[in-house]
Image (cartoon, rainbow, N blue to C red):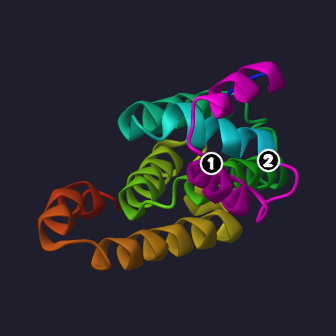
Amino acid sequence: MKAATVHQIKQELKTLEPNEVLELCLRLSKFKKENKELLTYLLYESADEATYVESIKEQVDSQFEEINTSTYYFIKKSIRKILRTIKKYVRYSDQKETEVELLIYFCQKLAEFTPSMDGSKALRNIYDRQKGAAQKAISSLHEDLQFDFEAPFNALK
């Protein structure tokens, strides 16, 4: 996700009501380094969550392609970096559906990754932890949404 310029953010804030600006600022105060990205999400992307999720998936795809596969050490470091990025974007969204969708997508990409994660106990543990987190997030959703996410979750190995 590319952050908007300060000028663009300022113009968008001018169009909002004072109470809305106050709410945005209070939420913004929870974060430090990623303030600009969070504000960009709140102002421009929160209205279309599906597009936001797709842009994150594209970013995850490109990060998976850039992984140095020479050793499992480098693979593990890259996988953790990707996971940190996903967690950051999930934190911006605050929607359980987004969290579930991105965690399932991460697990799918890791399961398909070559070399196999079965060669590294650390990678397997990361996979298992994220699969558990996805299961926990699915259980907190509405019944209809649980049903929608059960099929892709059950397809994981």
Element type at marker 2?
helix
Give x and y (percent) for residue 1: 65, 30
Tell me the residue at 43%/48% (across/down).
105
Please tell me how crowded label 2 is: few (under 14), some (14-19), or many (20+) other residues with Cα within 10 Å: some
Q: Earlier in the sequence, mark 2 or mark 1?
A: 1
From the viewer's side, name the closer residue of 152 and 12. 12
Which residue type does callout 1 highlight? Pro
Tell me the residue at 80%/48% (across/down).
34
Q: Would you say residue 81 is visible in this rendering?
A: yes
Q: Does the magenta-highlighted stretch encompass residue 127? A: no
Q: Is residue 153 above or below residue 121?
A: above
- Along the horizontal axis of the image, is 143 left or right of 130? left
- Report the mark closest to the observer, 2 or 1: 1
- Along the horizontal axis of the image, is 85 left or right of 153? right
The image quarter in which residue 126 lies: bottom right
What whole-number distance in Å separates the C-alpha atoms at marks 2 and 1? Answer: 19 Å
Pick out the residue farthest to the right. Answer: 33
Q: Would you say residue 114 is visible in this rendering?
A: no
Which residue type does callout 2 highlight? Asn
From the viewer's side, name the closer residue of 50 and 5. 5
Question: Considering the image in quadrants, where does the C terminus appear?
Answer: bottom left
In the image, the segment drawn in magenta is 6-33
- Along the horizontal axis of the image, is 69 left or right of 135? right
Please tell me how crowded label 1 is: few (under 14), some (14-19), or many (20+) other residues with Cα within 10 Å: few
Give x and y (percent) for residue 66: 72, 28
Pick out the residue farthest to the front. Answer: 18
Residue indicated by mark 2: 35
Element type at marker 1?
helix
Q: Does the magenta-highlighted stretch encompass residue 9? A: yes
Residue indicated by mark 1: 18
Q: Is residue 99 above or below residue 122?
A: above
